[in-house]
Image (spheres, rainbow, N blue to C red):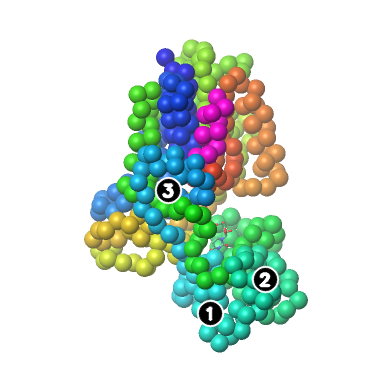
Amino acid sequence: MFDVIVVGAGTAGCVAARKLAEEKNKKVLILEKKHHIAGNCYDEKDEHGVLIHVYGPHIFHTGRENVFAYLSRFTDWYAFHHEVVANVHGKQIPVPFNLHTLRAVYGEKKGDALEKKLVSVYGMGTRVPILDLMNHEDEELRMIGKYVYDNIYVYYTMKQWGKKPEEIDPAVTARVPVNISYDNGYFADKYQGVPLHGFTKMFEAMVNHENITVEMGVEAKEVLSVVENQVFYKGQPFAGTVIFTGPIDEFFDCRYGRLPYRTLNFAFEHYEQDDYQGHAVVNYTVDEDYTRITEYKYLTGQKCKGTTISKEYPGAYTGEEGQIPYYAIANEENHALYAKYKARAEEIRDFHLLGRLAEYQYYNIDVMVEKAMVLADKI
Ligand code: UDP
């Protein structure tokens, strides 16, 4: 009946399915264990009519023309330009740290002098890793680096990744930038925004094709099995292609051990007031147990009475029922463990791993779309 089985109806699965259905005329079956499509991009109206991102804020941003053009076939866009502020001991400052932040922290006079120094050393429009500043011979530049490390980076990162400061990889610290510019934007990409009517609607339009069948509430392992490197679907040998986008360790019963992930818990709150925090996202970088508060109406552009927010609590993923693996934890040990699952999967005939979970990678939406397009073309 089907030429292709796609496990998982998230970004990776939906894009790959559409490409194969439309361009290769393949009959595609998507198996999704949740009761909705769109994966972690899933959004819906809550009981108060506010459009929320159920699995936390997702903002599309890309410089890739082909990816933007492809998704634009299935949606119009709300051209939302993402700006984030950090709450530092009750004061809101723009992040990533930039020249506005410099003035907010040090005042106009000192900020002015520090700006001149930063511009003369690094040049206007540059992105400087805080590690550069922290190791600089100039005392004032070291001071700025230390400010960012202490007030924006270290506590947030400890919460997010469950680590002590000394366990945080210096390579990660090196990536945290100071932007020598007056741009408050969180992303530098040409295209930024959210689908005008939500991510779910965009993915619904994508899988709405005569060659695609979506079955929800189906745990892949209940219908798929592997015997001697051949996939069986409902007990019958399946001659087609399988694209697997789920957690690969669980598919193999965690036989080599569980792949470690960070999970997130979202506490949603609704307020009968028009505004809660005045921003889409406020990061809590020096206190609180949650990392950030998202106020959805600012992110989706929805005009509505009342407002809904979510507080985001990171934690260790244990595999407990209902918990969601969000972030692969990149380190050598985990990549070595992943390599065993990958090697096992590669033995299976016409079985492809795709996506954050199946590839144990941290992909942005645009990169995921592109990878799915490339795999579909290859198939
Ligand atoms: N980060 C930080 N302070 C911030 C924001 C981010 O230290 O205010 C660090 C932190 O280690 C985090 C990483 O940068 O895990 C990436 O954060 P981002 O918000 O870009 O990623 P997301 O969690 O939205 O995927």
Instruction: Give the spatial CA distance, label 2 vs label 1.
Output: 18 Å
Where disc 3 sits, the SS reads loop
| Residue 227 painted magenta | no
**In the rendered view, would you say 171 is above or below 109?**
above
Residue at the (29%, 50%) spot, across then down: 46
What residue is disc 3 on? 55
Mark 1, Cα crowd under 10 Å, few <14 / some 14-19 / many 20+, is some
Q: CA distance from mark 3 to mark 2?
A: 39 Å
Front label number (1 vs 3)? 1
The residue depicted at 65 percent of the width and 37 percent of the height is 338
Q: Taking 77 as reference, is 376 left or right?
A: right
**Dot 3, how many residues are within 10 Å of its Cα: few (below 14), some (14-19), or many (20+)?**
some
Q: Is residue 233 above or below residue 71?
A: above
Q: Residue at x 57, y 82 (%)?
A: 111
* Mark 3 sits near ligand 1, with its Cβ under 8 Å away: no
Q: Quadrant of the C terminus?
A: top right
- Which residue matches tag 1? 103
Instruction: Give the residue pinned by disc 2.
Output: 122
